[in-house]
Image (cartoon, rainbow, N blue to C red):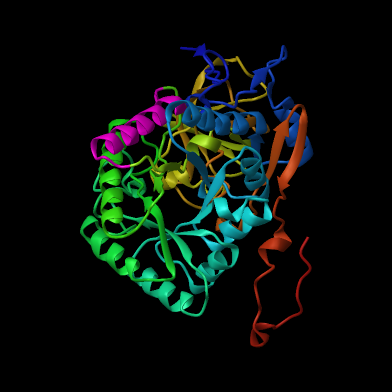
């Protein structure tokens, strides 16, 4: 039986909290049933840039940044700073856009750190995370005056050796595990005690005592993070009480911490049944909990830092594909394959993540069949969408998957030697290339052929 084809860009749109939308804020359908984003028709983007193609809507990105900043200004009585968790999508363009909105940035590697600096981010507003920072990464952080999030004893000893050669104090945030469980995928729970990140709670006092004797160290604050894609607000209230108590311990042990970094973790809407809190509700909950804990424990208000990533960029992004083969297994399933898959979006095969999709050249057409959208990689598990209602799908059709702005480009690979897609930023009817499409030549760029295996001359690659 046929049913209306689901259109994610129709119905209620929350312009104040884009994480609750299924599509970018600028998504619109023209009289010819064609989908446009950022004033650009997706079919035209395909014709100009090819597929697969990451598309980022600048309006949605800026709206998300502004939603966090406005909510903090309204609900938190002290100073605050939003740090973009750049692991969600690291690029020069993204760093520049975040800096232009007054955000800082959270980097987890030397590559993310250099990208942020090259994109114009003020190093004083950058923090460097990681549970196994290299000597080079630590030197890079010191060279640029970046705050280091101290994760473990091994790293503390490395910094002691490194800073013994410099007349420089390192600004530190001490990361610890608060022991708070969240209902999310086990791979993205980082606040419970069994975690590779951060000091255990009982280690916090010994760490603070040792740092109180270290002339090279300035304990600027504390950091904790309880997970990702979280819909519940209560864990964030619990986190505030634990962290403010830890701030009090730091002060009692001779430090003057000013910053309290509560991490990020706010979820987004990937499918219609998802119901994440608004950005304002998340900020209001965290702000009230920190202020209340400070009042109850007679502690001064810290500067409140948070590290949203997914909730800033996911909904702003989409991925455009072209349909190729079709396989019908009577009474079992119909597969349609696209020209991408797990190399440009590894989340379904890694986290069993779900997404919303449509045919952007036939929006509002009636759904008459159920299909499973498969990728082109040599893996049976390379499936992007399971059992999705669609109008009749044929080879050559365009297909768009929504909410791919986070952890898609940043987790992309060259599995099966497939080049990574291009990315464009759309705004006001203009599309600008922000990441070039890789070529076949790019795939061979770093390969070397040993001399004893050169049985014939190299073959030109086209």
Q: In the image as oriented, which residue stretches furthest toward the bottom? A: 452
Q: In the image as oriented, which residue stretches furthest toward the left? A: 202
Give the camera-side residue of 50 and 228: 228
The image shows residue 415, relative to residue 75, as above or below, that is: below
Answer yes or no: is residue 322 visible: no
* Residue 418: % across, % down: 62, 55
- Which portion, as a residue range, is magenta? 273-299
The image shows residue 239, relative to residue 92, as above or below, that is: above
Residue at horizontal 32%, vertical 39%?
184
The image shows residue 60, relative to residue 95, as above or below, that is: above
Is residue 168 toward the left or the right of residue 445 in the image? left
Give the camera-side residue of 251 and 328: 251
Is residue 306 toward the left or the right of residue 433 in the image? left
Residue at horizontal 37%, vertical 51%?
223
Residue 396: name its quadrant. top right
* Residue 48: % across, % down: 79, 38
Is residue 384 toward the left or the right of residue 198 in the image? right
Give the camera-side residue of 440 and 29: 29
* Residue 307: % across, % down: 46, 43
Residue at horizontal 25%, vertical 58%?
200
Is residue 304 toward the left or the right of residue 413 in the image? left
Give the camera-side residue of 204 and 345: 204
278 in magenta: yes
Number of marks drawn: 0
319 in magenta: no
The image shows residue 112, relative to residue 184, as above or below, that is: below
């Amino acid at each position: 039986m046929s049913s209306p084809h689901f259109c994610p860009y129709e119905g209620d749109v929350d312009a104040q909290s884009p994480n609750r939308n299924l599509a970018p804020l600028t998504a619109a359908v023209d009289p010819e049933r064609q989908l446009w984003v950022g004033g650009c028709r997706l079919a035209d983007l395909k014709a100009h840039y090819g597929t697969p193609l990451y598309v980022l809507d600048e309006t949605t990105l800026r709206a998300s940044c502004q939603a966090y900043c406005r909510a903090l200004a309204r609900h938190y009585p002290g100073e605050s700073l939003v740090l973009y968790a750049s692991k969600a999508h690291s690029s020069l363009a993204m760093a520049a856009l975040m800096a232009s909105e007054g955000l800082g940035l959270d980097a987890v590697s030397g590559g993310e750190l250099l990208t942020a600096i090259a994109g114009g981010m003020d190093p004083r507003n950058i923090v460097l995370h990681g549970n196994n920072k290299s000597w080079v990464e630590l030197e890079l952080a010191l060279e640029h005056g970046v705050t280091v999030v101290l994760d473990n004893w091994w790293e503390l000893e490395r910094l002691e050796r490194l800073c013994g050669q410099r007349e420089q104090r390192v600004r530190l945030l001490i990361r610890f595990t608060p022991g708070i469980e969240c209902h999310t995928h086990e791979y993205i729970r980082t606040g419970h005690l069994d975690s590779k990140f951060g000091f255990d709670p009982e280690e916090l006092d010994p760490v603070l005592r040792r740092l109180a004797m270290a002339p090279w160290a300035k304990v600027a604050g504390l950091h904790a993070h309880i997970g990702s894609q979280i819909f519940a607000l209560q864990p964030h209230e619990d986190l505030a009480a634990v962290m403010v108590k830890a701030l009090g311990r730091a002060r009692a042990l001779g430090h003057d911490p000013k910053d309290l970094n509560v991490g990020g973790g706010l979820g987004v809407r990937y499918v219609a049944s998802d119901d994440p809190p608004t950005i304002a509700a998340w900020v209001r909950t965290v702000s009230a909990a920190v202020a209340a804990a400070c009042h109850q424990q007679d502690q001064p208000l810290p500067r409140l830092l948070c590290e949203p990533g997914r909730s800033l960029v996911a909904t702003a992004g989409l991925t455009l594909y072209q349909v190729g083969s079709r396989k019908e297994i009577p009474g079992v399933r119909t597969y349609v394959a696209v020209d991408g898959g797990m190399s440009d979006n590894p989340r379904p095969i890694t986290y069993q993540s779900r997404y919303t999709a449509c045919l952007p050249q036939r929006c509002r057409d009636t759904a008459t069949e159920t299909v499973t959208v498969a990728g082109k990689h040599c893996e049976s598990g390379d499936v992007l969408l399971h059992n999705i209602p669609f109008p009749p799908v044929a080879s050559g059709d365009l297909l768009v998957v929504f909410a791919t702005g986070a952890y898609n480009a940043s987790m992309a690979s060259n599995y099966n030697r497939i080049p990574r897609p291009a990315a464009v930023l759309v705004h006001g009817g203009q599309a600008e290339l922000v990441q070039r499409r890789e070529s076949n030549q790019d795939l061979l760029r770093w390969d070397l052929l040993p001399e004893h295996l050169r049985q014939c001359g190299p073959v030109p690659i086209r």
